Image: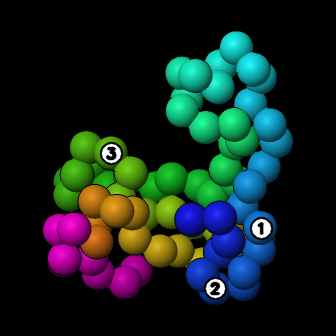
Amino acid sequence: MNNCPHCNANLIGEEIPKEQQRFFGTAHWHREIGIEYPEKYDGVWEYQCPDCGGTWPSEVAKLRGNYEKK
Ligand SMILES: [Zn+2]
């Protein structure tokens, strides 16, 4: 996700230091905030926009098909 689905803010952030890009598999940080719900899933369940506070489900949450809007 490169833009917020709610306010369309650009979510591409700072460039990752060259020596770390291989580790992260991408060249830029993303600005969205990963939110975890340990009772549901051991990992990021949804993302939150740092600008408007809107949330959207992670790929895992979409695959599970039981995403509930908070
Ligand atoms: Zn937003």
Residue 66 spot, x, y in % from top left: 18, 77
Q: Is residue 12 above or below residue 49?
A: above
Does residue 66 show up magenta in the picture?
yes
Circle 3: element type: loop
The three-letter code of the residue at mark 2 reads His
Up/down of 41 relative to 64, above or below = above
Distance in Å between CA atoms under marks 3 and 1: 24 Å
Asked whether residue 52 appears in the rendered view, the answer is: no
Q: Nearer the viewer, mark 1 or mark 2?
A: 1
Contact flag, marks 3 and 1 (Cβ < 8 Å): no
Magenta span: 63-70
Q: Residue at x 54, y 32 (%)?
A: 25
User: Identity of the amino acid at label 3?
Assistant: Gly
Residue 20 position within the rendered picture, expressed as x and y whole percent measured from the top left:
65, 19
Q: How many marks?
A: 3
Q: Is residue 14 left or right of residue 26?
A: right
Name which of mark 3 and mark 1 comes first in the sequence.
Answer: 1
Residue 45 image offset from top left, x and y in percent: 35, 59
In the image shown, does 5 or 40 lie closer to the viewer?
5
Query: For residue 43, which numbered disc appears in the image?
Result: 3
Does the Cβ of the disc 2 residue fall within 8 Å of ligand 1? Answer: yes
Q: Amino acid at mark 1?
A: Asn
Alpha-carbon neighbours of circle 2 within 10 Å: few (<14), some, or many (≥20)?
A: few
Mark 1: C-beta under 8 Å from nearest atom of ligand 1 = no
Residue located farthest toward the right when viewing the structure as drawn? 14
In whole angstroms, how far apart are the C-alphas of marks 1 and 2?
11 Å
Tell me whether circle 1 and circle 2 mark residues in contact (CB < 8 Å).
no
Q: Position of residue 11 (x, y in %)?
A: 72, 61
Label 2's element? loop
The residue beneath circle 2 is 6
Q: Is residue 5 left or right of residue 62?
A: right
The residue at which mark 1 appears reads as: 10
